[in-house]
């Protein structure tokens, strides 16, 4: 396994441990362990596959399993995004592999990005979200748990089969989609009516940054993407689980802890998100400075939504408080000294 | 010649999956698709790979034959968009495979495109679990066959995984989720 996917698998294990630690009952813990390890095993198989075409049937299998677990949404509705993703990715690989005009390679690049977006569940392929479904059975599982590894593997593998010209199209499409998700996600996280939608859009906004990072072929862009994925797996996901666990009992508060959590979610200094954003801006400046300006403007939209989400978690108590403290400590450590994570990922 | 017949059979097979809602129709479509994909896989990959496709497809169509809505239910009311999809995608795939893409293996390219695009479209458009899982089976088998496009052959792994997923999807879920 390449260093970057291996690092993300380790982060997934840590994220799953957080989720299990938060589950209030033994039964929920057991269910989460089963579902989480299944997802982890499937994602690891995707990462271990030597080619992406080999990984797609595994992805479909994972999609069938995920669609069949709990939830009020219909099985068929939950299967659709993965079928769409598998179809687009497979057609993209077919177009990349056959002889023909250059336009086929460009279609392959665009199809691969579209397939990736459908699998993760970002704009324009947002999965149907049911507020009463636990995170393990909801689209959050794709958006925040399986998605990071899948994106890393898919981009690495697709780059290997495309021509240099089409690699440029792939990068441009990733950046374009990233900017769209950045703006859409951050504004929606601020303006949308329900808190669960706000949380979902905040993940989407994070994905906007990560996709921009993947699109910047320079080393700084990939490093930024790894740090943003770190904040998704070990920052936003555990905090979302804290919020979701007692969503009906929570009263929004404005205590110092809520401000600190808002800062973490907004990617302000000294948290890991800040380091990721700085690297992303540096990578964008190296390639095309107006792009860095567009990203910087997009980053300003983060604050209102993050303040809202910070307040929504209320005052964490007992086990939740311990977990929030660990998440804050981890993100501060990674923000101040991100080198171990980047070295492990091969950057 | 054999590849050409298999390509037409594959198109008819996935078209049947698209146009029917009953278990007999879905099972027949899956069986026809399986036979066609087996022939294509035999030509492009090898006997072992083709056997994996055949076993996976036969198990999937057998399981579908035993469960799901009764009868054929071929082209129920409101099927016009599906019919248009079937014909339109066939013509488009044939044009792309024969004229836009280059080199030998037009039938293979046509089958790969049609066996991926039509089942995926079926999953997006249906609310029936039996139709969705049958189309999932056809989709993964189509993806496995398309794996032979790349020069670096992936070996038997994609065919085996696809066979497992196709058979497994036909088993799942045993009961429909409750509620809306």
Image (cartoon, coloured by chain):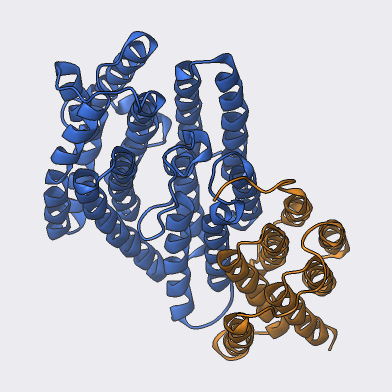
Chain colours: A blue, B orange
Q: Is residue A274 above or below residue A173?
A: above
Percent position (x, y) of residue B166?
75, 56
Which residue is rendered at x = 87% and y = 57% of the image?
A: B66
Q: Which residue is drawn at 24% across and 26% down?
A: A335
Image height of B66 relative to A20, above or below: below
Residue at image position (51%, 57%) is A81
x then y, percent, for residue A207: 33, 47
Residue at far top of view: A318
Q: Which of A220 and A9 is in front in this view?
A: A9
Report the side of B109 relative to B159 (left or right).
Answer: left
Nearer to the camera, B143 or A258: A258
In which quadrant of the rendered image does the N terminus of chain B lie?
bottom right
The single residue placed furthest to the front in the displayed view is B179
As drawn, is A158 to the left or to the right of B140?
Answer: left
Location of residue A178 (image quadrant): bottom left
Residue plotted at (24% across, 47% down): A192
Closer to the camera, A104 or A311? A311
What is the x, y in percent for residue B28?
83, 72
Compared with A180, A3 (above or below) is: above
Q: Is residue B30 above or below residue A239?
A: below
Image location (x, y in percent) of residue B168: 76, 49
Q: Which of A338 and A119 is in front in this view?
A: A119
Q: Is residue A163 visible?
A: no
How many discs mark residues in the rendered view? 0
- Is residue A19 shown left or right of residue B105? left
- Residue B38 occupies quadrant: bottom right
- Residue A328 makes an appearance in the image: yes
């Amino acid at each position: 396994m390449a260093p970057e996917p291996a690092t993300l698998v380790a982060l997934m294990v840590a994220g799953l441990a957080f989720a299990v630690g938060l589950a209030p009952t033994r039964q929920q813990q057991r269910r989460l362990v089963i579902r989480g390890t299944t997802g982890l095993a499937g994602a690891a198989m995707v990462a271990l596959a030597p080619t992406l075409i080999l990984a797609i049937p595994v992805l479909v299998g994972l999609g069938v399993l995920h669609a069949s677990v709990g939830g009020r949404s219909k099985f068929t509705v939950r299967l659709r995004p993965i079928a769409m993703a598998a179809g687009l990715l497979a057609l993209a690989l077919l177009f990349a592999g056959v002889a023909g005009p250059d336009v086929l390679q460009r279609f392959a690049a665009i199809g691969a990005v579209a397939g990736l977006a459908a699998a993760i569940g970002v704009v324009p392929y947002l999965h149907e979200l049911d507020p009463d479904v636990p995170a393990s059975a909801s689209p959050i599982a794709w958006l925040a748990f399986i998605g990071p590894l899948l994106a890393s593997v898919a981009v690495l593998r697709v780059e290997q089969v495309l021509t240099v010209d089409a690699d440029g199209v792939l990068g441009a499409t990733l950046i374009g989609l990233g900017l769209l998700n950045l703006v859409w996600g951050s504004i929606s996280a601020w303006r949308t009516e329900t808190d669960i939608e706000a949380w979902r859009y905040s993940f989407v906004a994070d994905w906007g940054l990560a996709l921009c990072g993947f699109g910047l072929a320079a080393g700084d862009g990939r490093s930024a993407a790894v740090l943003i994925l770190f904040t998704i797996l070990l920052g936003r996901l555990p905090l979302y689980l804290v919020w979701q666990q007692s969503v009906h009992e929570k009263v929004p508060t404005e205590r110092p802890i809520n401000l600190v959590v808002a800062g973490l979610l907004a990617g302000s200094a000294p948290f890991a998100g800040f380091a990721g954003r700085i690297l992303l801006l540096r990578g964008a400046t190296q390639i095309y400075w107006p792009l860095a300006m567009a990203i910087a403007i997009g980053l300003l939209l983060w604050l209102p939504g993050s303040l809202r989400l910070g307040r929504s978690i209320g005052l964490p108590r007992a086990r939740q408080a311990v977990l929030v403290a660990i998440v804050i400590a981890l993100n501060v450590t990674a923000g101040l000294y991100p080198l171990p994570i980047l070295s492990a990922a091969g950057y | 010649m054999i590849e050409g017949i298999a390509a037409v059979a594959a198109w008819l097979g996935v078209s049947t999956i698209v146009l029917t809602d009953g278990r007999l129709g879905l099972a027949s479509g899956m069986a026809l698709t399986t036979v066609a994909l087996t022939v294509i896989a035999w030509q492009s990959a090898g006997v072992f790979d083709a056997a994996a496709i055949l076993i996976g497809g036969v198990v999937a169509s057998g399981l579908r034959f035993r469960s799901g809505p009764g009868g054929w239910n071929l082209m129920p009311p409101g099927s016009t968009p599906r019919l248009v999809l079937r014909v339109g995608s066939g013509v488009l795939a044939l044009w792309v495979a024969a004229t836009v893409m280059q080199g030998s293996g037009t039938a293979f390219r046509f089958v790969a495109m049609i066996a991926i695009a039509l089942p995926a479209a079926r999953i997006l458009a249906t609310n029936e679990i039996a139709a969705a899982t049958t189309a999932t089976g056809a989709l993964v088998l189509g993806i496995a066959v398309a794996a032979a496009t790349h020069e670096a052959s992936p070996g038997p792994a994609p065919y085996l995984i696809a066979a497992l997923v196709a058979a497994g999807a036909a088993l799942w879920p045993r009961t429909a989720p409750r509620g809306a």
